[in-house]
Image (cartoon, helix red, strand yellow):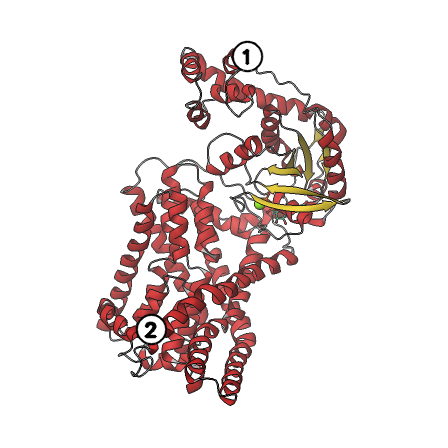
Amino acid sequence: MHTIALVGNPNSGKTTLFNALTGSNQHVGNWPGVTVEKKEGKFKWKGNQYNVVDLPGTYSLGAYSEDEVVARDYIIKGNPDLVINVVDATNIERNLYLTTQLIEMGTKVIIALNMMDEAKQKNIDIDIDRLSKKLGAPIIPTIASKNKGLDNLIEESINYFSKDNNSNISFSYGENVDEEIKSIESILANSTLEYPTRWVAIKLLEGDQDIYNQLGKIKESSQIIERISSLGEKAEEYELEIVDRRYAFINNVLKDSVKQPTETAETITDKIDKIITHKYLGLPIFAIIMFAVFQLTFAIGGDIFGGYVATFVEYAGELVVGFLNNIGVSEWLVSFISEGLFGGVATVFEFIPLIMVLYFFLGILEDTGYMARAAYIMDNLMRALGLHGKTFISMIVGFGCNVPGIMATRTLDNKKDRMIALLINPFMSCGARLPIYLVFIAAFFPDHGGIVLFSLYTLGIVVALVLGKIFSKTLFKGESSHFIMELPPYRLPIFKYVIRDMWDKVWDFLYRAGTIIFVVVSLLWILSVLPLGVEPYSQESILGRIGTFLSPIFIPAGFGTWQATVSLFAGIAAKEAVVAILGMVYAGVSEGSQLVSALQNVFTPLTAISFMVMTLLYTPCAAVIGTVKKETNSTKWAIFMAIYPFVIGWIASVLIYQIGSLLGF
Ligand code: GDP
Ligand code: MG
């Protein structure tokens, strides 16, 4: 089966194209750094199947960050039959830098000249035939978001498989460099290296660290290193020459094939940005927008839909339990279903409407391009704290789930920046923590849901930034690398995608409820009814005893009950389990009692806050810890990630409870 790889700058429309081709629904976002792993899919055309691979967006094929290495390794070692280079037509000059590198690699390239609608709007005039001749690659204009030009693109790609000419452009870096490349090539001629020799030679002259490391494997390595170090001062000169020649090539290509209006009028995007990214107004506007989102979430999700779902869940529970009692199922099974499943797992379901609404709004903010502005606004603050601007992008991704948030840190080029971004990500309040806040808000702050949620999310951000600053001063010293955030134009969100992303998150939530949370609740249910003979869910049960043993830890924080304790520890498996376990030990449909009223009896508004802050900050879930281990390749950091947030959460909740008590709350 033939394989096509999609390569292009961030935000050029690769994922949109990938989804349109394969009918899958990978996450599309109007900002850079959304896809950090390659995604594979298939499509059928005229009876044949083809593979498509969506690679992370990169500006170049150097080895500056992990996503660049992922992309170029795939192009070379994955042996795709064809590379479709997605080029943003409104930004040709910058996009072609990557294109020239693909041509250099000798890859078989077709260019999808995307965003033709926007280019037209901006009066950018492109002579496609001429451009194509100069680049030595076919160019197909497309509008991926409207499915335009895709048939052509596929047709042309398939024709291209059988042609054996790669780009027929020969690239010159000037006499001296060309000669040097040739002599390095001749040393490499019989080597076992998997890369094209010419490309390796160029990369070596560019000082590419990754390629240097790969050299270790071959016998010619010492000869090459000798050769390059003999260049002495000329090495730097050559490096600059290579980059210069690439730009010169691009300029030459663009010269008579692309006409851009010189005096670009101020676009709508520029006008909006003047206000939204304003030095002083930007941050307050960001805060107001987020606050409005939380308010709307409660107004729509809570008041309009929420009630129905809760009533439905309760009704369904009574119906099932009534039915089981009628047909005379054994008592323990009825108890498991009414308390374990409906008291626990189903309790979590009641919050789905709110979660849907919240993610709907966050999706719109992301797709319009606002979230990219949020990161831009935060950039100054981040830099003042010694953090890299891209950190905030991974933090916003973490609002959905910390696992992709941590993966998004791959776009950070240097190790120091990346480690800090990774370590502070779990303080971003993920979707799984929402049900906890929502149930406590329902119990204690029903009229102030928006402000409570807003405060919790903000607290998460503040704690993350403070710790980031501390880490950058202690654990990871060294310079932060420079970052210029590129702002995508504002775009109308494509509702299909917003809704699909929202469903993805809800589905993920349901899936976890049906798997991990189900397992956790089942196990803890068994512990809560054993040993036989004791009152189920009482302090004498095994679960009660474990909780009682551990609960003194939380006495200074005001919620040292065995129930709260076991729910927190269960939450380390998955955060939704906190509410599920509270539901199981406090409520259950058979008593007809509701978790909300049960909580009102054991918590106070102050201990509710202290508990919510603990759940915001303490140990992230097992999936996150696993991701940290995978991404850092270190058990040490995984253990650190399990412990230090617990300590931070504990200190914060103790402070809240102790100070609050002193003040008489
Ligand atoms: P990627 O980073 O390259 O994967 O880019 P995405 O596929 O995530 O797209 C970035 C943004 O551009 C999204 O908001 C898309 O909806 C939008 N987009 C993609 N293709 C087009 C296009 O041809 N025209 C316009 N106007 N927008 C597009
Ligand atoms: Mg993408």
Place residue 586 in its image quadrant. Answer: bottom left
Task: Choose between 293 and 341: the one closer to the eye.
Answer: 341
Q: Position of residue 165 (x, y in %)?
A: 70, 24
Q: Secondary structure at mark 1?
A: helix
Residue at image point 46% right, 77% down:
342
Q: Secondary structure at mark 2?
A: helix
Question: How many marks do you count on the picture?
Answer: 2
Left or right: 182 as drawn, with respect to 83: left
Relative to 126, residue 181 above or below: above
- Residue 377 in sight from this viewpoint: no
Task: Choose between 374 and 187: the one closer to the eye.
Answer: 187
Relative to 139, residue 601 above or below: below
Left or right: 600 as drawn, with respect to 430: left
At label 1, which amino acid type do we have? Answer: Lys
Alpha-carbon neighbours of circle 1 within 10 Å: few (<14), some, or many (≥20)?
some
State yes or no: Cβ of the residue under disc 2 lies below 8 Å from any atom of ligand 2.
Answer: no
At label 2, which amino acid type do we have? Answer: Leu
Q: Answer with the quadrant where ligand 2 appears in the image.
A: top right
Identify the disc placed on residue 182: 1
What's the distance in space between the residues labelled 1 and 2, CA to CA? 72 Å
Relative to 311, residue 514 above or below: above
Q: Report the quarter where the C terminus lies.
A: bottom left
Q: Report the quarter where the N terminus lies.
A: top right
Disc nearer the start of the sequence (1/2): 1
Residue at image point 40% right, 67% down:
520
Alpha-carbon neighbours of circle 2 within 10 Å: few (<14), some, or many (≥20)?
some
Relative to 414, residue 359 above or below: below
Circle 2 sits on which residue? 527
Eye-nearest disc, 1 or 2: 2
Q: Position of residue 452 (x, y in %)?
A: 41, 68
